[in-house]
Amino acid sequence: MTKEKRILQMYDNFLYNTLHTPIAKYYGIQDKNLNILLNPHGKNFLLSFNYDKKIKYTQFTNLPDDINNEIYSFLYPNYIHVTYEISFDNDYPFYPPMWSLYSVDYKCSTVYDVNIPEYYNYIIQNHNEESNRQWSPAIKLEQEFLRLIIRLNHFHHFF
């Protein structure tokens, strides 16, 4: 079986498994603020993490509604949207796929002094380094996605 056929077969199996279940729920993630999407991108795939956190509306009693609404507009929505691209070496599955940061978009005020794009780029670099050290050809796409999800599923700490 060629590399492309193997990858497409794993992708089709993953789509079949998640046909009626969102990816986050498929992996047992209970956080309703997180949405995970997988899309083909040429010969590669994009794995997107969209975390949207709603801020509870607070009515200041001594202010008019239009001013309250204006204040609230600065608070909502808070979000982090991170997309990674996975690419496959010609020798895949004997060499791990490589992830790269494709895009980061965010609006959040965090208590930590963190550069969000640098942080998510750092995570993926560590993930790739670990894959280079511990890769097995037996790891399927579904398992590789889970490995990355485990590394990233702490979005709630930024809010």
Image: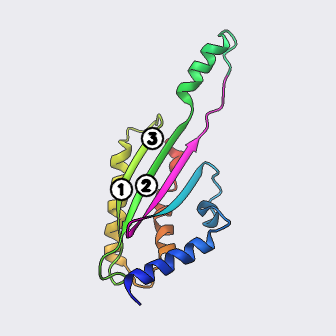
Q: Which residues are magenta?
A: 41-58
Mark 1–mark 2 distance (CA, rounded to whole Å)? 6 Å
User: Mark 1 highlights which residue?
Assistant: 101
- Residue 136 drawn above or below residue 155: below
Say which amino acid is labelled 3: Tyr
Please tell me which residue is depicted at 58% across the width and 41% down the height of the picture: 53
User: Mark 2 highlights which residue?
Assistant: 83
Mark 3–mark 1 distance (CA, rounded to whole Å)? 14 Å
**Dominant secondary structure of the magenta stretch?**
strand
- The numbered dot on residue 106 is 3
Residue 126 occupies quadrant: bottom left
Q: Which of disc 1 and disc 3 is earlier in sequence?
A: 1
Left-right relation of 90 to 104: left
Please tell me which residue is depicted at 37% across the width and 57% down the height of the picture: 123
The spot of residue 24 in percent (x, y) is: 60, 60
Say which amino acid is labelled 2: Thr
Question: Can residue 54 be found in the magenta stretch?
Answer: yes
Q: Which of disc 2 and disc 1 is earlier in sequence?
A: 2
